[in-house]
């Protein structure tokens, strides 16, 4: 993936005002159960009020049940999509509201 201001990489965490590469080892993320609450909290702590979660090009990255529970408990609007669609959603939302996104570019 190529992200303006951040360069090239495989996975990214984007939040209002910036972002960085997404290192799954920091939170213990794996394809199953998938995106963990700690990954989403990173975005929320940096001002995201809506969250876009990418499941990879072949939808191989899951989203942990605990992550869905966190987003619902905090009443955070979210979208889950294949990576290309997630990028499209993120780019459409970024001008309208403080959005964060977790993007997995492979599988």
Image (tube, rainbow, N blue to C red):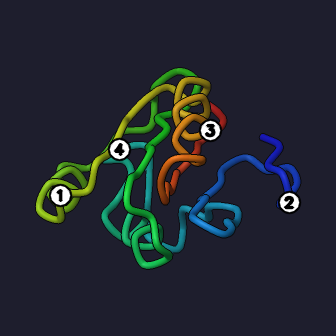
Q: Is residue 67 left or right of residue 103?
A: left
x, y percent for residue 98: 49, 59
Residue at 43% from the left image edge and 29% from the top image edge: 81
The residue that disc 2 covers is: 5
Specify which label sits upstream in the sequence, 4 or 3.
4
Q: Is residue 57 above or below residue 32?
A: above
Specify which label sits upstream in the sequence, 3 or 1.
1
Q: Quadrant of residue 107?
A: top right
x, y percent for residue 66: 18, 57
Residue at 44% from the left image edge and 71% from the top image edge: 27
Real-space Cα distance between discs 2 and 4? 30 Å
Specify which label sits upstream in the sequence, 2 or 1.
2
Q: Quadrant of residue 6?
A: bottom right
SS under mark 1: loop
Mark 2–mark 4 contact, CB under 8 Å?
no
Quadrant where the N terminus lies? top right
- Nearest-to-viewer mark from 2 and 4: 2
The residue that disc 3 covers is: 91
SS under mark 2: loop
Real-space Cα distance between discs 4 and 3? 27 Å
SS under mark 4: loop
| The residue positioned farthest toward the bottom in the image shown | 45
Q: Is residue 84 left or right of residue 93?
A: right
- Nearest-to-viewer mark from 4 and 3: 3
SS under mark 3: helix
x, y percent for residue 94: 58, 48
């Amino acid at each position: 993936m190529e992200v303006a201001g951040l360069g090239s990489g495989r996975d990214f965490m984007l939040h209002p005002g910036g972002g960085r590469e997404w290192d799954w080892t920091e939170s213990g993320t794996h394809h199953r159960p998938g995106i963990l609450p700690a990954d989403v909290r990173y975005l929320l702590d940096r001002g995201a009020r809506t969250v876009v979660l990418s499941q990879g090009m072949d939808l191989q990255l899951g989203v942990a049940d605990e992550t869905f529970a966190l987003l619902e408990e905090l009443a955070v609007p979210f979208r889950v999509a294949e990576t290309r669609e997630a990028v499209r959603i993120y780019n459409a939302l970024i001008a309208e509201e403080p959005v964060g996104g977790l993007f997995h570019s492979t599988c």
